[in-house]
Amino acid sequence: YIFDRAVSYRDVITDSAAPGNSVIKDVSGISYDSTGLMTRSHQREQDVNGIITETDLWNMSYDGRKRLVGFSQTEFTDGKDEYGNPLQARTGTVRKSAWYNAFGQLASYEDLITASDTDITKKIKFNNITYDKSGLIYGYVKWTRSYGANEEGWFDVTVTDKRLATAY
C-alpha cells in the first residue's frame, strides 16, 4: 500500500446465467503521485471465451481540487473470434478538458479515440451535462465526429445526441 491505497487487486466476475464461466480481471501496477492521486494502472481481463484484453491507463491529470481532468488509455485485445480467426485490436483514448460545475459534478469532457483495426478516428464531446436534485444525470449533449478512410474513401460524419430529460 501507498498512502493506504491499493496497488493491485483481482476480481472474479460470475454471471448466474452462465455458472462456471467466470471473467477474471487483474489490476496491477497502480501508482500514485506524492499527493496520493493515482497516476497509472494496468488491467488484464480474460473473458469466458479466452479473449484477453489488456488496458493501460496513464498520464492522469487533476485540477486544483484533485478531480480527474484528463488521461491516456491504451487497450489491446488478443484472442480468436467464433470461427477461430485471430482477433487483435489496439484502441487508444485520450481524455482532456474535463470540466466540473460549481457542485463538483462532471459537466463536460472530450475524448479522442483511435483504433488499430480501422483508419477511423472518433472525437467525442460531452457537453451541458446536467443533474437532478439527487445528483443523477438528467441530460447532456453528446457530439461524435468520426473521420478517416474506409473502403469507399475518405469520410467525415458528425452525430449529435441530445438527452433532454431522464426519469428514474
Image: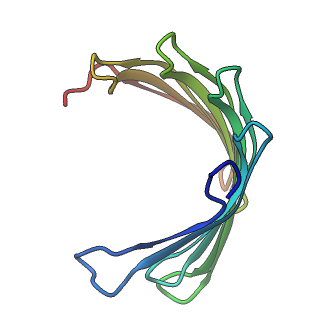
Seen as rendered, the residue at the extreme top is 102
Q: Nearer the viewer, residue 20 or 154?
A: 20
- Vertical position of residue 14 compared to residue 57: above or below: below
Seen as rendered, the residue at the extreme left is 168
Residue at x 23%, y 76% (from the top left corner): 17
Q: Position of residue 110 (x, y in %)?
A: 63, 29
Image-quadrant location for residue 52: bottom right
How many numbered marks does the figure carry? 0
- Vertical position of residue 54 compared to residue 128: above or below: below
Q: Is any atom of residue 56 visible in this view? A: no
Q: Position of residue 136 (x, y in %)?
A: 32, 27
In the rendered structure, the answer to whether residue 70 lies left or right of residue 50 reads: right
Q: Nearer the viewer, residue 167 or 119?
A: 167
In the rendered structure, the answer to whether residue 135 lies left or right of residue 70 reads: left
Residue at x 40%, y 80% (from the top left corner): 22
Q: Position of residue 53 (x, y in %)?
A: 60, 70
In the rendered structure, the answer to whether residue 2 lies left or right of residue 25 reads: right
